[in-house]
Structure formats: structure tokens, C-alpha cells
Image: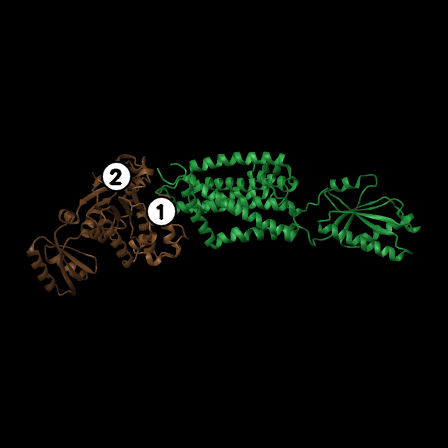
Chain colours: A brown, B green
Amino acid sequence: MSAIEVSGLKKKYGSLQAVDGISFSVKKGEVFSLLGPNGAGKTTTIEILEGLRDKDEGTASVLGLDPWKSGYDLHKQIGVIPQGFKFLDYPTPKEAVNYYATLFGTKVDADQMLKRVILDEAKNIWFQNLSGGQKQKLGMALSLVNDPQVVFLDEPTTGLDPQARRAVWEVIRKLKAEGRTVMLTTHYLEEAEVLADRVAIMNHGKIVAMGTTDEIESKYGSGQRMVVKAKDDLLRYLKENTKLEVDGDGSTVTVFLRDKNDAMVALGAIEESGAGWDDLTVRKDRLEDVFLRLVGETGDEEAGAR
Amino acid sequence: MAFSLGRMLAELKIYARGNVRSREGFFFTLVFPIILILLFGAIFSGGSSGPSTVYVQNLDGGQVSTAFVSALNSTTAVVLRPAPAGVNFSQYLSSHSSTDGIVIPQGFTTDFLSNHAVNVTVYGNPASTTSAVVFGITSEIVNSFNLHGSTGVIGVSQKTAVSSSYKYIDFLVPGLIGFAALTSPMFAITNLSSTYRRDKVFKLLSLTPLTKTEWLMSKIIWYIGTTTLSFILMSLVGIYVFGAHITLNWGIGVFLVLGPFFFVSLGMLVGTISNTPESAAVVGNLVTFPMMFLSGTFFPVQSMPMYLQAIAHVLPLYYVIDGLTQVMIYGNFGAAYFDMGLVLAISLVTFALAVKFFRWRED
């Protein structure tokens, strides 16, 4: 049985169709990531699955339960970090874990729990004085107090510095190693690449691509590309003097390679152009490239976020 | 979703801890009540606040009594108002909302001139500072007359103008306890309900087994505690600084429970209709301020114009303060039972409405 099953799910706010008929399922023990720009419908989807919002149409089940109707029972079996996790100002992480343990009626070794999310060094600091990364890690700890089978993480690393982000990733890896199902929303593509078994890319309430990152890259990617640091004079030269498919942003020029011959032509033309250039690389399309192609480079505000 | 005492106590503990650790919590729980009673006690409990009005009933009308009244009049500390000879002086003072007066007996001039002892009676409230001033001035003038006369024949006797020696502070204490029961929970809970929603703390709590009833009950218990603490602090300051008379009885306890019970529920209800902390503050103030000033907190409702009295009678705080006044000052439990019943009824209704309309999930 899948941990999460979603079929034809729809949710509307006024005239805005936030979620528009999406379907997917998440296997037990899988890390599944919903990717998409802000406003794509990720948070609405995850909140419906957490039982925080009611759906308009379709079906959703988590661990075989309807999240809205059976929310009270479901919440005992899932862990959640809402987007932008905030807590009360004054409890310390240790007090917060003990508080949650009492609410859930479970016995938890708070010190051990905080060690597990790499927060034991800050266990006696008031929440309001914790750093952003430490706050997120406390959110992780609280979401694990009830020993959940499914953990929902809604943009758990947004706004964190790279070090804190990697610390949170470490915790997510541990969750996977423990066999928990993790549903992760993020607009950091690298995060999904590193952590997720499968990803679904959402845009305007719909899923526009789904699969492993390799599957998505090969299905929606354009193959190889040559990227070179150069100004627009090289871009103009290539456009005027070759039949290559090229693009540029003022500081880099990208040549989309259909075959090996394109690579040879491109190298020759770059050399002949007389334009200044540096750092030439050839690589395969990455998830980011596919993502930008699928959700558009300019139409969606977070499309370029990493 | 059965009620769990353990969960409610866990919520109470974490909220209490936050209040104890925050400077605002410390200020509003411990310092603010003391400032309030000191401030209002000092403003309204007399002191040197200009000349006192003193009613004089001159039953004599002779030359010595006229000179005596002139001498009193020549001091700037009192303003004399004549009282008619034929009236009951105590009732006259009472009908003029005063406790200070002097009665010069019939035959005063004759007795004085013939060296017979004669007494001037000074009415006053022994607990009032103005009465002490009136008595002091009268005694001064009596001394002066006695010195000028051949022998000291005038004496001064005192009478209490009211049956019990209540002071303004005695009426202020119940008012301020009502004030504490109103403001602390109302401001805190309206603010809390909107900031928790903004910061998604309610969403977070909705993902735990904690119920709305348990959450709200924990706040009620906390504010019963803080209101009781305010009561103790204000009573101690009232007694030791201003000489207030406070009779302890179980009736006070009833209102110390019912007041916060009602205002926490009301605060939550108000909080449910405001989406931002800013609008919650505005709505909270709209509800709180009229109650604060029109329910007899600082001024007796009876001294207000009739239309304001009519408004006061629909404000719940009026019944809390009236009830407290009945049990603390008059020991009139008959009247207090009505207030208790009424406040209990509206508290239960408001609590039920708050639990019903306060949502921590969204549709």
C-alpha cells in the first residue's frame, strides 16, 4: 500500500485554481519532492494532505485515512513542519520537545531527540534566540516526537544559510534511513536532486513532470550543452555566422548541442570570433535546466531559485 | 477528543513559563496592578486638593457664633456653605454628598459670654483626609476664641457623618480588580489569537492532540491566577498605603474566577474576527475601552448621566465590579448572587461561542 495517494485533487481560492486536478502516489519509505515556483500549489497540496485544508474535488489519502475527516487520528501518525516554522518565543528546545511529548502522550528522551536533529548544543536556548537553522531543526525534532510514519516538510530550508541547509539535509537523510516516508516541498532544485527518490514539478496547480531526476532530465532535457563565459558580442557572432542554437544572458553563452559536430563547429566559431571568453564547459541538461524550460524563466518568480 | 487534564496542564505550563520569562508578562502581572492602585489611589484619595466644602448649621445666630463663622471663613482651607436651621444635619450632609460639616448649638453666644461650657460639633468621615483638615481648623479657631475669652469654654466634639467609614479607595479596589480581570486577558488573548494565526502556531497546534477547549481552558486558568495575584497586590497596597478596608470572603473568589473566565473567552471571540495583530488591537480596544470607563472602574456608575448608566448596565464588566463591590464593601450577597449568575451565564455562552468559532484549520 502507498503511504500517500492523490487523485484528481482540486482546490480553488476565489477565482484562483490553486491545485488543478493532480494525481500521484508516494510509496512507503520514499522521499518524494514537490518542486515548483511560489504559487504553483505545492503548499496547498501538502496542507490538504496534512489535514489543514479541505479539498474541493478529487481524493486524497494518507496512510489510508482521509486527512480532513480523520485529521485527529492521522495527526498522531504523521509529522509536519509547516512552511516558515515558528514556535512560541520562550520555551527552550528541550522544553518544547517535552511539551510535545506530553501532548502526544508519548515518552521521549528530549536530549536524545535533539541530538538526532543535531540541535543538542542549543537545547537550553530560548526559541526566540535560536538561529534560523536551529529553529528549523527544532521543527524537525517536534515533527518526530510522535514517531511518525510519514513526515511532511514544507520548504524546510527556505531562508537558511548553506551550512544550516546541509544540516537539515542530514536529518532528512536519517529519516529516510529509518524507513520513514518523507514528502518534501522545495523550490531549491539542488535539494530535490540530492534528497528525493522521485520529484514532481508543479506549475499553475498542475504537475508538469514526474519521476526520478534522471528520468525527468532525459525525458524533458535537450541533451548536451556547451556553456562559455563570454559577453554578448560572442552571442551575436555565433547567431550571425553559424546555424547553432544559442542563448545568452550577458555573461554566459550557451550552445545547445544536437550532435558532436555541433560541438566542433561551436569550438571553431568561438575561436574565430575573436571575442574574449573563458571557462568553457560541456555538460548534460540538469534538473534546473528542465525546470526552467517547464515553468518558464521569467513568468514565475522563483523559477531561477536554487 | 476527550478532555485531557495532562495536555491542558502542559499547555498551561508552557504558556506560564513564557509569561514569566517575558518582560511584558512580568510587567503586566506584577508591576502594572501596583502602578494602577498607586496612581488612582493617589489621584482620588484626597490629599491636598484645594479647599474643602464645609456645611455650617448655625443654630445660634448671636454675635459670637457669627464671629466664629467669620473666623472659619477667613481661612482659605475651607469653603463654608450655610445649612438651614430646621433640617436634620446628618441627612442634609448626606443629601449633599458631603461628610464635612459644623453645627453651632443654640445658646452658643449666651453660654460663651456667661462662661458656660459649650460644644461645637464637627461632622466628618474619620477616614477622610478632608475631615481631618476641617476638624483641625475648627479646633484652631476654638482655641483662639478660648484664648481671647476669660476662660476656655468652647469644646469640640466629633460625629461621624456616615454609618461606616468607607473611603474612595474602598470603592476603587473592586473597580481595579475588575479592571485587571478585563484588560490583562482581553489584550493578551486578542493579540495572541491573531499572532498565533499569523505565525501559524495554531496550525502547528492543530497537528497535535491538543484540543481548542484544552487550549482555552489553560489560558483561563492562567488569567485566574494572574488576576488573583493582582487582587492580592492591589489589596496589600490599598490596605497599607491608603488604609483601605477589605473584607475577605468567598464571594471575591467567585468573581476572581468568573471575571477571567469571561474575558479570556471574549478575547478569543474578538480574536477570531480579526486577521492581523493590528486589527485585533483595534477591535480589542473598541470592546475594552468603553467597558473600562463605563463600568464603574474608576467612577461610581451612579454618578454618571442616566444614558451612560443605561450603557453601563449592558456591559458585562459592570456586573463583575458591582458584584465585587457588593461582597467586598457591603457584604450584600443577595445582590451579588444576581451578578454571579449573570456573569456565569454570559461566560458559558461566550466560552462556547469562542470554542465554536475559533478555528485553527482552514476550509
Viewer-proximal residue among A145 and B262? A145
- Of A178 and A67, the residue lying toward us: A178
Q: Chain of mark 2?
A: A
Q: In terms of image quadrants, where is residue A225? A: bottom left
| CA distance separating discs 1 and 2 | 22 Å
Identify the residue shown where x is 65% and y is 42%. Answer: B329
Q: Which residue is mark 2?
A: A63
Instruction: Please name the amino acid that badge 2 sits on.
Output: Leu
Q: Residue at x 33, y 57 (%)?
A: A120
Q: Residue at x 29, y 51 (%)?
A: A156
- The C terminus of chain A appears in which quarter of the rendering? bottom left
Q: Amino acid at mark 1?
A: Ala
Rendered location of residue A77, percent (x, y)? 29, 42
Within the image, what quadrant is residue B4 found in? top left
**Callout 2 secondary element:** loop
Q: Is residue B46 above or below residue B311?
A: below
Mark 1 vs mark 2: which is more N-terminal?
2
Q: Quadrant of the N terminus of chain A?
A: top left
Task: Give the residue number, with chain letter if any, for mark 1.
Answer: A101
Q: Residues within 10 Å of mark 1 (few under 14, many from 20)?
A: many
Question: x and y percent of residue B77 in the render?
Answer: 76, 54
